[in-house]
Image: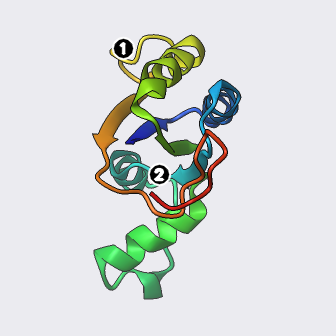
Amino acid sequence: MKLIILITSNAENGVEVATRWQDAGAPGVTVVKSVGLYSLQRKLQSDSIEVPLHMASSMASVMAYVLREMENTNHVLLSVVPKELVPTLLDEARAVMGDLLEPNHGVAFVVPLDQAIGVRNPDGDDSAR
């Protein structure tokens, strides 16, 4: 089993890729909204968000406030799949997002899993592995 992770700054692309992964046989796809730290720092430096004075006591509270005020446009897709499915899912991501080696097209990586518990088996057997 493998954990495939895709990060995109385009929310529409994230949803389309997730749907394609599901159609291609991924037993489950989780989509998480996110904000990159670099984007957050740039937003703070641009002074386009006014932070209430009482929040300015620490950088952590300022960043937490800005996070709440920012639009979450990034998506992180997570899916635990059989290793044989990984090339197909990466092809589906490229079909939507283009060459992932190009700047601002997204980031994908694959992590080997020793064990996955509570993950639906694409073959229909829902027992824990």
Viewer-side residue, 87 vs 13: 87
Residue 72 is situated, as x and y percent measured from the top left of the image, at 58, 51
Q: Tell me if mark 1 has few (under 14), some (14-19) or many (20+) residues whose alpha carbon lies within 10 angstroms of its own.
A: few
Work out whether residue 72 can be spotted: no
Viewer-side residue, 49 vs 11: 11
Residue holding disc 2: 35
Residue 98 is situated, as x and y percent measured from the top left of the image, at 50, 12
Q: What element carries label 2?
A: loop
Q: Is mark 1 on a helix, strand or loop?
A: loop
Residue depicted at x 39% and y 18%:
100
Question: On the rendered structure, is 5 left or right of 96?
Answer: left
Instruction: Name the quadrant of the C terminus.
Output: bottom left
Question: On the rendered structure, is 44 left or right of 75?
Answer: left
Classify 93 as above or below 15.
above
Residue 77 is situated, as x and y percent measured from the top left of the image, at 52, 43
Res 17 → quadrant? top right
Res 108 → quadrant? top left
Residue depicted at x 33% and y 46%:
38
Residue holding disc 1: 102
